[in-house]
Image (tube, rainbow, N blue to C red):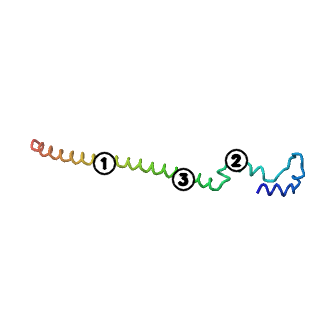
């Protein structure tokens, strides 16, 4: 693309030119800047980068989900333990009330 634009601007004069001279090509600076970053210039590399970033985000989301699941398991276990202790406390309180109720 740039070569075709260069040929159009110079119009074949480069073949007879024996000395370098400055030729301003419209858009050449922009294209050079764009192609400095291959991820922006090459559509396949750009898509690969997007896939890589998306994969990282998904991986982090799954890691967080697993950690929350582990925390939930701990909370469920603590809840079950608390329920068992509450039942034991209630049972012990009834036994003591029956025993001590005779004295009052």
Determine the residue positioned at 89% across, 50% down. 17
Determine the residue positioned at 9% across, 44% down. 102
Q: Is residue 59 left or right of residue 77?
A: right
Residue 63 x %, y %: 45, 48
Neighbour tally class for label 2: few under 14, some 14-19, many 20 plus, Cα within 10 Å: few
CA separation in Å, label 3 and label 1: 37 Å
What mark, if any, has residue 54 been given in the picture? Answer: 3
Q: Quadrant of the N terminus?
A: bottom right
Residue 88 x %, y %: 21, 46
Residue extending furthest toward the left:
102
Of pointers 2 and 1, the one earlier in the residue sequence:
2
**Mark 3 against mark 1, which lies toward the viewer?**
3
Secondary structure under badge 1?
helix
Secondary structure under badge 2?
loop
Q: Is residue 65 left or right of residue 52?
A: left
Query: Camera-side residue: 32 or 60?
Result: 32
Query: Camera-side residue: 104 or 33?
Result: 33
What mark, if any, has residue 36 been given in the picture? Answer: 2
In the rendered image, which residue does mark 1 sit on? Answer: 79
When asked about the image quadrant of residue 99, the answer is top left
**Mark 2 against mark 1, which lies toward the viewer?**
2
Query: Camera-side residue: 60 or 10?
Result: 10
**Mark 2 against mark 3, which lies toward the viewer?**
2
């Amino acid at each position: 693309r740039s070569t075709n634009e260069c040929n159009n601007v110079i119009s074949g004069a480069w073949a007879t030119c024996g000395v370098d001279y400055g030729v301003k090509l419209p858009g050449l600076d922009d294209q050079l800047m764009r192609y400095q970053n291959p991820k922006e210039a090459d559509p396949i590399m750009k898509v690969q980068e997007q896939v890589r970033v998306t994969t990282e985000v998904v991986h982090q989301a799954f890691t967080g989900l697993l950690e929350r699941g582990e925390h939930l398991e701990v909370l469920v276990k603590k809840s079950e333990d608390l329920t068992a202790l509450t039942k034991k406390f209630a049972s012990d309180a009834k036994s003591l009330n029956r025993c001590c109720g005779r004295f009052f």
